[in-house]
Image (tube, rainbow, N blue to C red):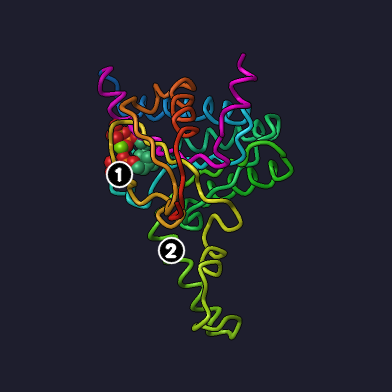
């Protein structure tokens, strides 16, 4: 039954998710925000595993934005500690055949986290299943600026002609270089905005919003989004 359904359904190659609503999930339960972030992190692992299981090629999740540094220091420290624990467990990626990559301004993170990220990326580089991008200290505008600086440097070095800069040239300097654009962007938690996520790459993405808070966003909700996606008519400007 399930098999038949999969054959009829057009799955996205690349899913992007804004993992939002951890704080409100905790508040509803009279728990500290940190409990929401822990629950959100656990749910992220479940969803990544599920995407791998159903054969999704790329999953990009928003874990921490360039704007999230504006939060109280306690909360930022707590999120970084959850990240450390997750990365120390990163041998699991390889066992699960998930290839992990971090996108964002990684160089500005604490040095121990940079080392753990390097390990996780190297250890999972040969995995042939899901390609998982974790957006960390990520901002879409920051990413485009970073690419623009690289382009300017390459012009200065004579590697590229300023008059001939193409979309492909800019794309090749984004953190997501070489990857397909997200086919669908999912935002739970009842907010209807991109919050500086994948602003170049989302030019033709489908959007799907839900009121479910991220820690409660079980695979059945992802399935709802996938069912809806398979019915969308993507025209890319054509007819
Ligand atoms: C998303 O949940 C996690 C991060 C931004 C790191 P929030 O912490 O934004 O949760 P809400 O939006 O306050 O509920
Ligand atoms: C977006 O959520 C960033 C992440 C989920 C990591 P925010 O909670 O930071 O977004 P805003 O502030 O509501 O736009
Ligand atoms: Mg939020």
Count neighbours of disc 2 (C-alpha within 10 A) and say few if under 14, some if 14 to 19, many if 20 or more: some
- Dot 2 falls on a residue whose secondary structure is helix
Please provide percent x and percent y for residue 50: 57, 26
Q: In this view, does 148 lie above or below 35?
A: below
Q: Which quadrant of the view contains residue 19?
A: top left
> Is-magenta flag for residue 19?
yes
Task: Pick whichever, 37 or 127, lies toward us.
Answer: 127
Task: Pick whichever, 179 or 100, lies toward us.
Answer: 179
Q: Mark 2 points at which residue?
A: 144
Question: Which span of residues is magenta-colored?
Answer: 1-29
Task: Pick whichever, 54 or 116, lies toward us.
Answer: 54
Please provide percent x and percent y for residue 135: 47, 46
Instruction: Tell me if the residue at label 1 has its CB under 8 Å from ligand 2.
Output: yes
- Dot 1 falls on a residue whose secondary structure is loop
* 112 sits to left or right of 75: right
Please provide percent x and percent y for residue 204: 44, 51
Which residue is drawn at the image coordinates 51% and 74% (left, top)?
151
Determine if residue 70 is in view. Answer: yes
Q: Residue furthest right?
A: 126
């Amino acid at each position: 039954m399930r098999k038949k359904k999969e054959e009829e359904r057009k799955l996205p190659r690349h899913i992007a998710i804004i993992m939002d609503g951890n704080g409100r999930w905790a508040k509803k339960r009279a728990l500290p925000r940190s409990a929401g972030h822990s629950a959100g992190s656990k749910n992220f692992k479940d969803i990544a595993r599920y995407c791998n299981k159903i054969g999704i090629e790329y999953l990009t999740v928003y874990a921490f934005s360039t704007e999230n540094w504006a939060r109280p220091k306690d909360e930022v420290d707590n999120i970084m500690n959850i990240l450390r624990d997750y990365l120390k467990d990163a041998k699991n990626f390889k066992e699960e055949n998930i290839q992990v990559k971090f996108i964002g301004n990684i160089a500005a993170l604490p040095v121990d986290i940079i080392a753990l990220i390097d390990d996780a990326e190297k250890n999972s580089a040969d995995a042939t299943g899901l390609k998982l991008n974790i957006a960390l200290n990520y901002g879409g505008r920051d990413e485009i600026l970073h690419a623009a600086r690289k382009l300017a440097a390459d012009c200065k070095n004579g590697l590229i002609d300023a008059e001939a800069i193409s979309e492909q040239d800019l794309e090749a300097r984004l953190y997501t270089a070489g990857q397909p654009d997200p086919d669908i962007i999912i935002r739970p938690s009842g907010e209807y905005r991109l919050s500086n996520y994948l602003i170049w790459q989302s030019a033709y993405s489908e959007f799907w919003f839900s009121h479910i808070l991220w820690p409660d966003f079980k695979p059945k909700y992802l399935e709802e989004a996938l069912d809806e996606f398979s019915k969308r008519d993507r025209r890319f400007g054509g007819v």
